[in-house]
Image: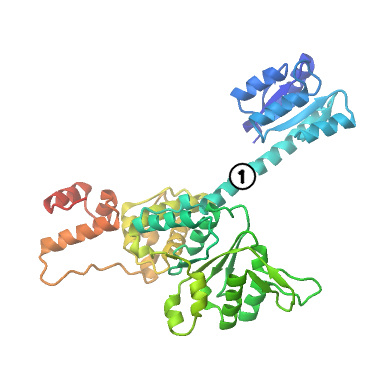
């Protein structure tokens, strides 16, 4: 790890500058030197340094001013102020302006080694946290939702349009279609992005537990806030809203109407500003017609309605998603698989995916775990058939000729693959050149 860190030593005393640089080089670091602040800034502008040792007293630009300019070039730079004149005032001034550490001449080489080791360890943790934050944000961004399906693109455009509104959103779709991902994308694209996003599964708790979870309670010595209070200023995501009891439907309606509620066992009204995004796999209009869901609550929830299509209706996304999940899980699991064969993609595209995107991700992760090669093949997904996976059997109108059937099948396959010749040929198990010939023969528009 040490060799990846470059260090710049800045000191107008040549002997001190070179001796410190020599000690650091012995520890394995890549070290440059500069005789003053201006030279240090010039080197920092053209190079990349993770740590700076800057002398406090120098002609021209002193250590504090040099440090401030270096931080202007790189706000995350770790800067150590070095001085032979240690006072409380100079130490405080250096730390206030952003110095990571403060050391006094003459310095002990072992102490310098320990100091740099601590800084490197801290910086590495900071970098890892930054990477994790970027990954987290990328998974919740509208721009990073993976799809080339026109219907999904319309949904994503709608998400951007409504992101900064206070209006409630109702996301409907089968289990595993990515309802929470879309909810997080809406939250992240709007003005509430920096505030809490709180998710609640309404189907996993009994009525009394869910009531306490949502609204908090005052039955103990100290009030316990609920998820609505935790989401104040941000977004609360109510997953499987169709499963809540009639009593909680009334309580939720009050929150949507008045933006206030009472904690369980409490007598003081609590006001919140939390945007509500709800999701369900149940058709709430049918549930309301059957008397299982309140009409007035449905109207309050259904201000902005989003219907997520199941994966079987956006099969052109299967290869994109499969390769995305392969990259993610192969990296996390330390496996060497880097690609998916055309035959395996054809098998995945023919699967019905009753569990939708979630099931596809689980299937790819399972294949990555058990694979031994660099490419996932059909044999790596054989469990889909053993687990009851069904391949789609094309149906044709009666009286259709063999050539008409072939044309129909090619057209359907091209539609499923979004016009991707390579993927379509893999599904049909023919060469691309053969597919091109048949497209010309049957005058199939692309």
Which residue is more in the foreground, 232 or 214?
A: 232
Quarter of the image for the N terminus: give it: top right
Which residue is more in the foreground, 61 or 409?
A: 61
**Left or right: 255, with 367 as reference point:** right
Say if residue 27 shows up in the picture: no
- Secondary structure beneath label 1: helix
Q: Position of residue 31 (x, y in %)?
A: 67, 24
Say if residue 390 shows up in the picture: yes
Colour scheme of this structure image?
rainbow
Q: Position of residue 420 (x, y in %)?
A: 28, 50
Query: In which image quadrant can residue 147 be found?
Result: bottom left
Q: Position of residue 392 (x, y in %)?
A: 28, 67
Query: In which image quadrant can residue 7 be found?
Result: top right
Q: Position of residue 319 (x, y in %)?
A: 36, 54
Residue assigned mark 1:
130
Q: Which residue is found at the position 55% from the left and 49% from the top?
A: 135
Which residue is more in the foreground, 430 or 35?
A: 35
Which residue is more in the foreground, 3 or 289?
A: 289
Residue 139, relative to residue 1: is it above or below? below
Q: Which residue is found at the position 88% from the left and 24% from the top?
A: 85
**Left or right: 331, with 374 as reference point:** right
**Left or right: 331, with 267 as reference point:** left
């Amino acid at each position: 790890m040490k060799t990846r860190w470059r260090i710049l030593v800045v000191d107008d005393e040549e002997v001190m500058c070179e001796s410190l640089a020599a000690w650091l080089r012995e520890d394995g670091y890549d070290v440059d030197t500069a005789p003053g602040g201006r030279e240090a800034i010039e080197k920092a502008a053209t190079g990349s340094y993770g740590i700076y040792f800057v002398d406090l007293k120098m002609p021209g630009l002193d250590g504090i001013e040099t440090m401030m300019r270096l931080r202007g070039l790189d706000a995350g730079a770790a800067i150590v102020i070095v001085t032979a004149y240690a006072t409380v005032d100079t130490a405080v001034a250096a730390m206030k302006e952003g110095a990571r550490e403060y050391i006094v001449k003459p310095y002990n080489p072992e102490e310098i080694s320990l100091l740099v080791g601590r800084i490197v360890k801290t910086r590495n943790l900071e970098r890892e946290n930054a990477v994790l934050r970027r990954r987290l944000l990328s998974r919740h961004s509208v721009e990073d939702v993976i799809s080339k399906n026109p219907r999904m693109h319309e949904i994503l455009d709608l998400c951007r349009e409504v992101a900064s509104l206070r209006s409630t959103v109702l996301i409907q779709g089968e289990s595993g279609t990515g309802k929470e991902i879309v909810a997080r994308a809406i939250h992240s694209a709007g003005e509430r992005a920096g505030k809490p996003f709180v998710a609640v599964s309404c189907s996993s708790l009994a009525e009394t537990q869910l009531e306490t979870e949502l609204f908090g309670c005052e039955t103990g010595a100290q009030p316990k806030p609920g998820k609505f209070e935790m989401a104040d200023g941000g977004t609360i995501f109510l997953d499987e809203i169709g499963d809540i009891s009639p009593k909680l439907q009334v309580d939720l309606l009050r929150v949507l109407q008045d933006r206030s509620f009472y904690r369980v066992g409490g007598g003081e009204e609590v006001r919140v500003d939390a945007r509500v995004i709800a999701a369900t796999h149940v058709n709430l209009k049918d549930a309301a017609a059957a008397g299982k869901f309140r009409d007035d609550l449905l109207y309050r929830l259904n201000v902005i309605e989003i219907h997520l299509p199941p994966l079987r209706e956006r099969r052109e996304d299967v290869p994109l998603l499969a390769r995305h999940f392969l990259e993610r899980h192969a990296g996390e699991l330390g496996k060497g698989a880097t690609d998916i064969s055309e035959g395996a993609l054809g098998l995945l595209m023919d699967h019905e995916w009753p569990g939708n995107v979630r099931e596809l991700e689980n299937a790819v992760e399972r294949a990555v775990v058990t694979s031994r090669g660099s490419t996932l093949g059909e044999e790596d997904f054989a469990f889909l058939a053993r687990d009851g996976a069904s391949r789609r059997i094309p149906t044709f109108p009666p009286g259709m000729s063999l050539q008409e059937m072939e044309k129909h099948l090619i057209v359907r396959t091209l539609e499923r693959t979004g016009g991707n010749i390579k993927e379509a040929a893999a599904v049909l198990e023919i060469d691309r050149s053969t597919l091109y010939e048949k497209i010309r023969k049957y005058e199939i528009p692309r």
